[in-house]
Image (tube, helix red, strand yellow):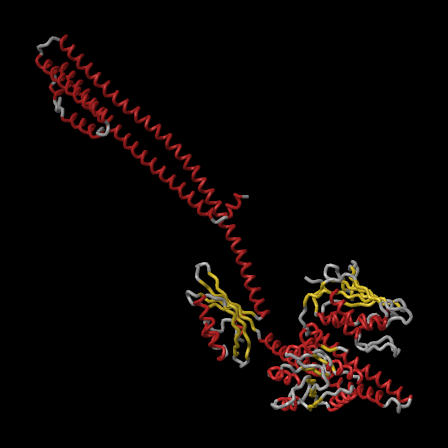
Amino acid sequence: MKLLKLYKSPEIFKIALIIAIVVVGYIASVFYGQMKNLDSSVELITNSTKTQLELEKILSIITMYESNLRGYYITKDEAYLKDRFLRRGEIDENIKKIKILVANNPSLIEDVDLLNTLVDRRFNLFRETLLMAKSNKADTATFNAKIKQSSEFTMAMKDFVYKTINTEGAKIKAHNLNHQFDLRDSIISAFLLVLLSLLILLLSFNKINVDVIELKKTNDELQFLYLSFNKAEKIAGFGHWKVNTVTGVYTFSDNFYRLFGVEPNAFEPTFDNVAKFIHPDDLDYVIKSHKGSLISHDSTVITYRIILDNGETRYIDSVGSFTQNSKGEVVKTGVSHDLTEVYKKTLKLEENNFELKSINEELESFNNIVSHDLQEPLRKIQMFISRIVDTNNETISEQGKIYLSKIRISANKMQSLLIDLVDYSRAIKGDKEVKQIINLNDVVNQVLEDLSSNIEEEKAVITAGVLPEINGVSFQIEQLLVNLIVNALKYSKDDIPPEISINREDIGPDEVFEGKLILDHDYYKIVIKDNGIGFKQEYAEKIFVLFQRLETDSKYSGTGVGLAICKKIVDSHKGYIKAQSEPNIGTTFSIFLPKVV
Amino acid sequence: MISHNDSMHILIADDDEDDRTFFSEAMMELKMNNKLTLFNDGKDLMDYLSCPDIVMPHILFLDLNMPYMSGFECLKEIRADDRFKDVSIAIYSTSSSEKDIEDTFVEGANIYIKKPNDFSNLKKVIKEVVNINWQFHSSGLNKETFFFSI
């Protein structure tokens, strides 16, 4: 695995190349050494062959002199002594040549010197023998002895010379043999090294090949990526650009040109060419931001208008930041986006928002009218009725009194309706109120205190368990509980006093509201249960609709707003409310409020 | 120190003629021997109060919603003037909005009365308010006791 990794790395190239160069260099140097050795041994062989030749020449001259001398002695023919007999010159020439040839060999120099003295002595012997032969004084026996002595000396000299030649020959032979071994070794090692280098080169070549294939693959992928990126830019309405802060060269993507309503590469990628499109009012700001950033290297977010050739104004949002390229030069890269559609939509939204706001304000003033201006005349009517009843009680007929009472009941009903409507509209606006942590037990206590007279009147028994803390708008939660308790008091049975309980319950695993599962982890469940007249379960959702009433009997003085307010309040607290009821048994309201995070 | 005698000077500023009539009739029926002065609007009231030689009122009933100068503006001006520091101010309004109650409380009104819709209730309110021990009421004043409930 590690090896494979090494093989894949580009370092392997350099290593292989270095090894190959070292090996080839080594081979070259070894061969150079071998060649040099060969050269010197060839020279050595030539030298020694020449030396042998010269030595043999000397011997042959001496042998010739000896046979001539013998010839003369036998025939006494002077012709044998002709032809420069016993001249040293030729032999001296030979010895001189040998001395040059053996100049590098000290042991041979000694031998040559010895040879020279031997030759001297031989010549002396020659002369003595010649003198003896010429004088004829000596007897045959003495002469023969002299001849024999000469001949033996010659033999000894020959022996010496051959010994020298042989020694030299053996040396050369050994040298030659060694040299041959060396040569064979170096050829084998060179062959192996060449094979090794070849292997390394082959591996490297394979590696290069694989790399090239991978490079091509990567290149193809890059090409594809570039194409899809281009396409994506076109679809998304994005364009990108680069500027090298060192060279000042700009690069624009194809779609960057399209943002300006022109074909790709329609103009030279320079800042000035882009600036021509920028709205004159925005140009200073764009130049300041962009050019400034090229010095400070701070990211930029610029929104500006451009004017296309057809006169159309578009909104461009341009974001730029700085990175370093492979050369370490700082490059600003940016993405520009055509915001026009978004901008137009935002404008439209703002307009709608403004309209909604003014409608809301109108509703608010309408609310004020309902809460104040409509109540004013109503209160007057009530006041005047009470004045008539108080002051003219004796003079009014019984029928008139009944009518007046009916007027009063209607006026009272209208008043509570107005109050409910104001409360309802306040509940609608509820999600704008500031929420805070509220202890529900505190709220219940407050509500029970506020409603104490009603509770007393109905002889109701109200119990509350331990309730949690929730995040809510205090007055709304209060209103919610007031409405539910008032409801329970109002729709109670005539014969038995109302019993109302307020408790927290755990949420079961299958608690569902309008198809949505409600988890105990997220919500508190508050249950308000009464023993009132109840209603058919099929109306359980209808009761929360504005102005929907189930009881039309005049003894139940509802406006049809109370529970609608409850629903609004629970909605604005991101909770749920539902009712479970059975006629003559009672009603259970379940409120789910988000837990405090 | 204002004592609860029969010669209390009571002012009411209300642009509604009927309400002024109800108020004076209620006072009459209660047989209170107090001096009652009526004003048609806030400006009327302030013109009167700016006179240097007036009999200093003990209680001022102030409607909020009035033309020319609202009850709220009157309240601010009166409370800014040290001359009237002993005058008890009762807001007397149809509105019972949290905002109005809160604002007038902050600006130094002593009690907030929602106009009743029954004459006998009106009489009860006037009787109780006139007989309040103001010093005691004001010392323990908070938002709960500020809003008068019958």
Residue toward you, A425 or A218: A425
Q: What is the number of callouts on the image?
A: 0
Question: In front here: B1 or A69?
Answer: B1
Q: Position of residue A161 (x, y in %)?
A: 23, 21
Expressed as whole percent of the image width and height from the top left, the position of residue A297 reads: 46, 65
Q: Is residue A165 left or right of residue A471?
A: left
Left or right: residue A373 compared with residue A198: right
Is the residue A520 above or below the residue B57 in the image?
above
Front residue of B118 and A447: B118
Front in this rendered view, residue A301 or B40: B40
Kindly identify the residue that appears in the image at 79 percent across and 80 percent down: A417
Is residue A535 in view from this perspective? no
Answer left or right for A167 relative to A200: left
In the image, taking residue A491 as reference, residue A93 lies left or right, namely left
Q: Position of residue A204 (x, y in %)?
A: 47, 46
**Residue A482 seen in the figure:** yes
For residue A187, what is the image quadrant?
A: top left
**How far across and how far down the image is residue A66, in percent?**
17, 18
**Residue drawn at point x = 8 percent, y = 13 percent:** A135
Tell me which corner region of the image, top left, top right, bottom left or bottom right, holds residue A363.
Answer: bottom right
* Quadrant of the drawing holding the C terminus of chain B: bottom right
